[in-house]
Image: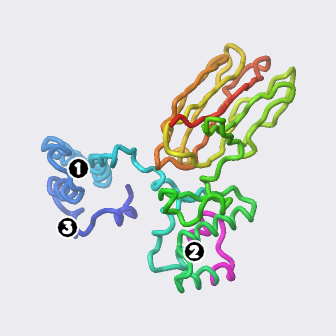
């Protein structure tokens, strides 16, 4: 912590001369401000921190130590902490990250949203038009964020929006807005039994590989029927949102016996890890992934470890994810 960060603390319940107090009083005052109970901070802990101050420890470091004692709130309704609301706002826009910014100050809200999503300030025409509509109440901040995401896509950026609201409460349905992250990814298929399957990579006999177009990948260089690969990310994407529930990741790939791959499934720009493993040699199997309501912008990441030139190949026969429930 720095002095500049103290404005984030509950200063209204702290004495004005907090940094002039004796060591024990300083610790007690901050413990009270942070609502620390005796179980969170025992008398022995308080004495130890006070002794550290008397021994010359910077008081800001003591405040950091006290902050670390705050209990993590229990997840509501057995859900994990909603990392989607804590992630840094960017072009993968969670609506709730934007609509509550600068309440009552639409110009500041617009500048912030354009800066985070488009990487630029709004033009005069964009700012005046959106500000006028917001002031008259003919549009909402949520709708404005969706328009800004669409402008970012028009500028050539990869951008999507999503929300934690259920589909029936969302004012723009998926089929009407291509920037909605809930729209079916390009590689999605539905079986005769109605089971959705997102196909990332699949080998097609006598044709080659079918690779979803919304994935970033290494160049497809074929030699002896295999994909020549190098160390680093092989596939990443699609950063789209999937239905809540249990999904199954099917992997069927051939590689040299000592070759290694990292396979990750993450959400919210990597803040939440839903699955992670390292494969050595060939593998065929299925992994279970639990996707919760707060898991947005799901991304599959496959990373190639450093390998010898003769082992720099891979034959992925199937990489897909299907909904189980």
Read off the magenta span. 110-128
Q: Residues within 10 Å of mark 3 (few under 14, many from 20)?
A: some
Label at residue 15: 3
Sequence-wise, the earlier of marks 2 and 3 is 3
Q: Which residue lies most toward the left here? A: 43
- Residue holding disc 2: 110
- In the rendered structure, are the residues bearing label 3 and label 1 in contact, judged by CB atoms less than 8 Å apart? no
Q: In the image, residue 192 lies at what x, y percent?
A: 66, 35
Q: Is residue 37 above or below residue 151?
A: above
Using the rendered view, name the quadrant where residue 256 is placed.
Answer: top right
Alpha carbon distance from label 3 to label 1: 18 Å
Q: Residues within 10 Å of mark 2 (few under 14, many from 20)?
A: many
**Which residue is located at x 59 percent, y 72 percent?**
144
Chief secondary structure of the magenta portion? helix
Query: In x, y percent, where is residue 286?
Result: 57, 25
Query: Along the line of sight, which residue is nearer the eye, 228 or 307?
Result: 228
Q: Which residue is mark 1?
A: 53
Q: Quadrant of residue 247?
A: top right
């Amino acid at each position: 912590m720095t002095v500049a960060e103290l404005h984030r603390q509950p200063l209204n319940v702290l004495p004005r001369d907090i940094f002039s107090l004796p060591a024990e009083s300083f610790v007690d005052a901050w413990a009270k401000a942070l609502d620390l109970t005796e179980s969170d901070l025992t008398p022995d802990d308080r004495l130890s921190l006070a002794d550290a101050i008397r021994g010359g420890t910077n008081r800001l470091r003591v405040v950091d130590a006290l902050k670390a004692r705050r209990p993590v709130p229990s997840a509501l309704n057995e859900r994990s902490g909603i990392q989607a609301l804590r992630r840094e706002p960017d072009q993968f826009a969670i609506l709730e990250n934007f609509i509550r910014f600068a309440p009552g100050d639409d110009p500041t809200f617009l500048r912030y949203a354009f800066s985070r999503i488009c990487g630029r300030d709004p033009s005069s025409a964009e700012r005046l038009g959106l500000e006028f509509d917001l002031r008259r109440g003919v549009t909402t901040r949520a709708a404005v964020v969706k328009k800004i995401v669409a402008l970012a896509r028009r500028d050539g950026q990869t951008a999507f929006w999503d929300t934690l609201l259920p589909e029936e409460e969302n004012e723009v349905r998926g089929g009407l807005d291509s920037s909605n992250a809930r729209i079916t990814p390009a590689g999605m298929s539905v079986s005769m039994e109605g089971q959705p399957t997102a196909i990332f990579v699949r080998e097609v006999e006598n044709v080659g590989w079918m690779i979803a177009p919304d994935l970033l990948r290494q160049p497809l260089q074929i030699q002896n029927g295999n994909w020549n690969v190098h160390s680093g990310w092989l596939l990443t994407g699609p950063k789209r949102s999937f239905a809540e529930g249990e999904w199954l990741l099917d992997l069927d790939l051939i590689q040299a016996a000592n070759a290694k791959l990292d396979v990750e499934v993450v959400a919210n720009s990597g803040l939440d890890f839903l699955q992670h493993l390292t494969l050595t040699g060939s593998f065929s199997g299925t992994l279970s992934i639990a996707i919760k309501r707060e898991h947005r912008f799901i991304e599959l990441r496959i990373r190639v470890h450093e390998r010898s030139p003769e082992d720099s190949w891979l034959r992925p026969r199937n990489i897909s994810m299907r909904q189980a429930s």
